[in-house]
Amino acid sequence: MFKVLLPTDFSNTSQNAIVYALEMFKGFEVDFDLLHVIFYEGEEANDLKDLKKNATHEFELLKNKLGKNNIEIPKHFSFHIEHGNHISQMIDNYANDHKKDLLIIGATGEIFSNHHLLSERTIELISVTKIPVLSIPNNTSYKKINDIIYATDLSDIDFEARELIAFAKLFDAFVHFVHVFPEMLGTTRFNPDHITNDLIKKFKYPNITFDAIMNNEVEKSLVDFIKEKQPAIVAVFTHKRNIIEQLFYNSVSKEVSIKIDIPIFTFKKNAEV
């Protein structure tokens, strides 16, 4: 059974991500596991007990809220509490120990600025875990996953395509690979039709396109492409924190975070250890 971990602090953003996940996998046989990690550095045992009691109460309130909003609670829908002083690492440890296939989280938290599409804590979790992460922007509602845009640097496209297409097949979605390259390389380096046909043949999946964009402003070109296509999901493979920060956190992307509320799907590169 496909296993989805839903880390939650019970903020509106994390609750929205839970609703998105339930809508996304409606009709699938999926095990949903909600995880609340309490930041705890060894204070009084009674304090931890009270925090756990409050978290359990919040979970019951969440279930009631889902029911009132006519959102069906699936058969496999559990809740667990962990505690520690490194929240992202605790989430990753739990996900690995319980062999989770996917993490779905809110892209921002109430303690973080809404000027960024991804919060610092979200970026930290993406950096720590090897498990795919789907980050849901605040107030973004689920829409059918028909199209996924993947920004590739072509350094390991076979691995990237294999991983991403496996996910896309769940929803019979189109995967739009896009590569932005500087003008100094010239237009003759890439043949989009040839690469598209090669990917379709190699992975036996017809819903693939490839675009090569020549532009020295890589980030702006990617953003413009995303805004034009309006996909359900934007996918990024990364073995470095840098690309996530450049596209979705740094000051150059403040305008993007306000205008593009699209879920971000991140995978780790094959070389990541």
Image (cartoon, rainbow, N blue to C red):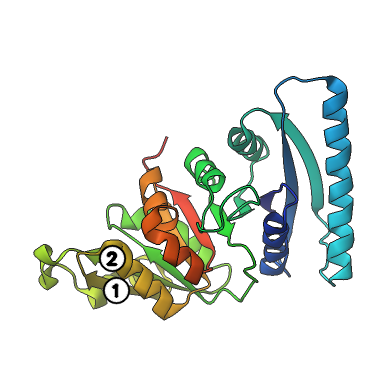
Mark toward the start of the polypeptide (1 vs 2): 2
Residue count near mark 2 (Cα–Cα under 10 Å), binned few <14, some 14–19, many ≥20: many
Q: Which disc number belongs to residue 172?
A: none
Q: Which residue is drawn at 54% across and 64% down?
A: 263
- Measured in 3D between alpha carbons, the distance from the residue under mark 1 to the one under mark 2, in whole angstroms, is 6 Å
Q: Residue at x 88, y 24 (%)?
A: 46
Q: Position of residue 107 (x, y in %)?
A: 58, 56
On screen, residue 216 versus residue 32, left or right, reads left
According to the picture, the residue beneath numbered tag 2 turns out to be 179
The amino acid at mark 1 is Asp
Under circle 2, the secondary element is strand
According to the picture, the residue beneath numbered tag 1 turns out to be 211
The amino acid at mark 2 is His
Q: Position of residue 153 (x, y in %)?
A: 29, 57
Q: Position of residue 162 (x, y in %)?
A: 42, 58
On screen, residue 238 versus residue 194, left or right, reads right
Looking at the image, can residue 206 be seen? no
Q: Of residues 1 and 62, which is closer to you in this image?
A: 62
